[in-house]
Structure formats: C-alpha cells, structure tokens
Amino acid sequence: MKVKYLNNGTDIKVFLVDEIISRQKKSGEIKKININSPLGVSLVGRTVGETVKIGKLDNYIEILEFVNKAN
C-alpha cells in the first residue's frame, strides 16, 4: 500500500505483516510494518482515498494506492 504522510508530504510504500519486526525492515522500496503497530492498526480495513490518524499521535496519512507484494 502506498501512503502519504500529510504532516510532511512524504510518500512511502508499506507491506503489512503479522511478524515481529525488531527494527525497520525494507524490501526494496517497501517498508514492512507489523499489523499491530500504530501505523498497521490505522491501515487495516481502510481503502484508497481515506485519511487516517496514526494511533494517538498527531500524524495523519492518506492512502494513495494498494501494492500487491513486498518483492
């Protein structure tokens, strides 16, 4: 899934996984994010075009598109 941080305009691609991630892992350009992390919880069940608040933080993201695999 490709998302845009609205607070700073940064676009990133994320791949939601159900595994423990001890530090930020990337697979090419795609960041693996645990589904139980604040970002992961905010993204589960959402659709393209939605704006979502990340956890209790004052950060917001917009979902831009879905990416089918982590490469």
Image (cartoon, rainbow, N blue to C red):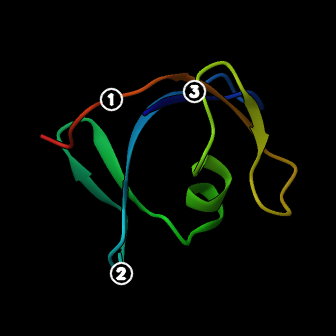
16 displayed left or right of 64: left
Query: Element type at marker 1?
Result: loop
**Residue visible at 26% across and 35% down in the picture:** 29
Residue at the image position 60 percent from the left and 46 percent from the top: 45
Amino acid residing under circle 1 = Val
Q: Position of residue 7 (x, y in %)?
A: 77, 32
Identified by mark 3, the residue type is Thr
> How far apart in space, not on screen, are marks 3 and 2 (Cα)?
25 Å
Mark closer to the observer (3, 2) = 2
Disc 2 marks which residue? 20
Q: Which residue is mark 3?
A: 10
Quarter-wise, where is residue 18 in the image? bottom left
Q: Amino acid at mark 2?
A: Ile
Q: Residue at x 83, y 58 (%)?
A: 57
- The number of numbered badges drawn on the structure is 3
- Per the image, the residue denoted by label 1 is 67
Task: Choose the circle earlier in sequence order: 1 or 3.
Answer: 3
In the rendered structure, are the residues bearing label 2 and label 1 in contact, judged by CB atoms less than 8 Å apart? no
Q: Are marks 1 and 3 in contact (CB under 8 Å)?
A: no
Residue 66 is situated, as x and y percent measured from the top left of the image, at 41, 27
The numbered mark, 3 or 2, whose residue comes first in the sequence reads: 3
Direction front: furthest residue: 45
Residue 13 in percent (x, y) is at 39, 34
Which image quadrant for residue 50?
top right
User: Which sits in the foreground, 32 or 36?
Assistant: 36
Dot 3: element: loop
Instruction: Look at the numbered disc 2 and give the secondary structure of its residue.
Output: loop
